Amino acid sequence: MATEWEGKSKGTLLGYKLFIFFLNTFGIGIAYFILRFLVAYYFLFSYRSSKAIYHYFHKRLKYSVLKSIAHIYKSYFTLGKVLTDRVAISTKFRDRYSYTHDGIEHIDYLLKQNKGGILISGHLGNFEVSQYFLEDRYSISKIYMVTTHAEHENIKEYMDGIVAKSSMKFIVVQDDMSHIFEIHSALDQGGLVVFTGDRYLPGSKVLKERFLGAEANFPLGPYLLATRLKVPVLFVYVMKGPKKEYHLYARQAVAKARDPQALLKEYILSMEWMLKKYPLQWFNYFDFWKDSRKP
């Protein structure tokens, strides 16, 4: 089983094109129906990711063996719907979805203050769709997403050609660390910089902390940067509801400056609270807690 995120998402360009053809031609309901067959394939043949998510349900959430196995399929299906929604919302089906929020006043305040801020999200829910809803409320050219070159380039180029363009900006992590200057510049202009706080690339520095009852590794960078720059920090998640709806949650962090470990602990508490409400929306399909190494 892979014990670290390998830096790439699964899927082929042909697979993306076929699925999006069915979505655009027959609609969201048919796309969800087709997903059931795609999910069955992953459930049966994607051993490493299935084992990792089984450990999440069985060892972390304490589900029974049978319930954990059943939830492997449910997890894949939930992820499939989230990915489908991401495409649907960014193309011609945006008005089919509703959007609610809890704590969005914290984002309002930061943008009004115009002094910059850091948002930390994670690979749970579907934060990527937030840009298409937030731009109805703000001029989101002041929101910057820190990302990597991890996706398959041919898939990324294809998706860039079909989705609606957003004014949200992206800061790409570079080997020469030049992205740090871009982050500082964005904050100096009163921008909000978004990090994902639950994945690190192999070889990068990490922080260790207990999460759902066992120790796990988290990327040092977002927490170190956030506590050194002395700017407000929010934990922000966008979670899928039972139908065509999404809920944004924003919570203000209170950790002291120059204490990245304390900020990480706050982040973990926010994630644990979120996963109690949405246990199927944990989308880290690798050995997050290194369970394969444990007796």
Image (spheres, helix red, strand yellow):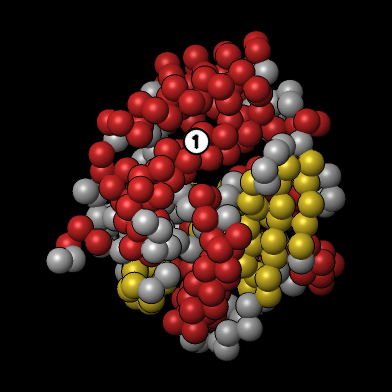
- What residue sits 34% from the left and 69% below the top? 216
Q: Position of residue 292 (x, y in %)?
A: 20, 58
| Depicted 257 relative to depicted 160: above or below | below
Is any part of residue 265 visible from this angle? yes
Q: Position of residue 217 (x, y in %)?
A: 34, 68
Question: Who is closer to the viewer here, 122 or 77?
Answer: 77
Query: From the viewer's perspective, is 102 left or right of 195?
Result: right
Q: Position of residue 60 (x, y in %)?
A: 38, 64
- What residue sits 57% from the left and 13% below the top? 21
| Depicted 211 relative to depicted 138: above or below | below
Question: Who is closer to the viewer here, 4 or 173?
Answer: 4
Residue type, label 1: Phe
Q: Which residue is mark 1?
A: 77
| Depicted 135 relative to depicted 10: above or below | below
Quarter of image, res 231:
bottom right
Is any part of residue 111 visible from this angle? no
Q: Few, some or many C-alpha atoms within 10 Å of disc 1 (few <14, some 14-19, many ≥20)? A: many
- What residue sits 65% from the left and 11% below the top? 25
Query: From the viewer's perspective, is 165 left or right of 8?
Result: right
Q: Position of residue 65 (x, y in %)?
A: 32, 52
- What residue sits 35% from the left and 26% below the top? 41
| Depicted 229 relative to depicted 3: above or below | below
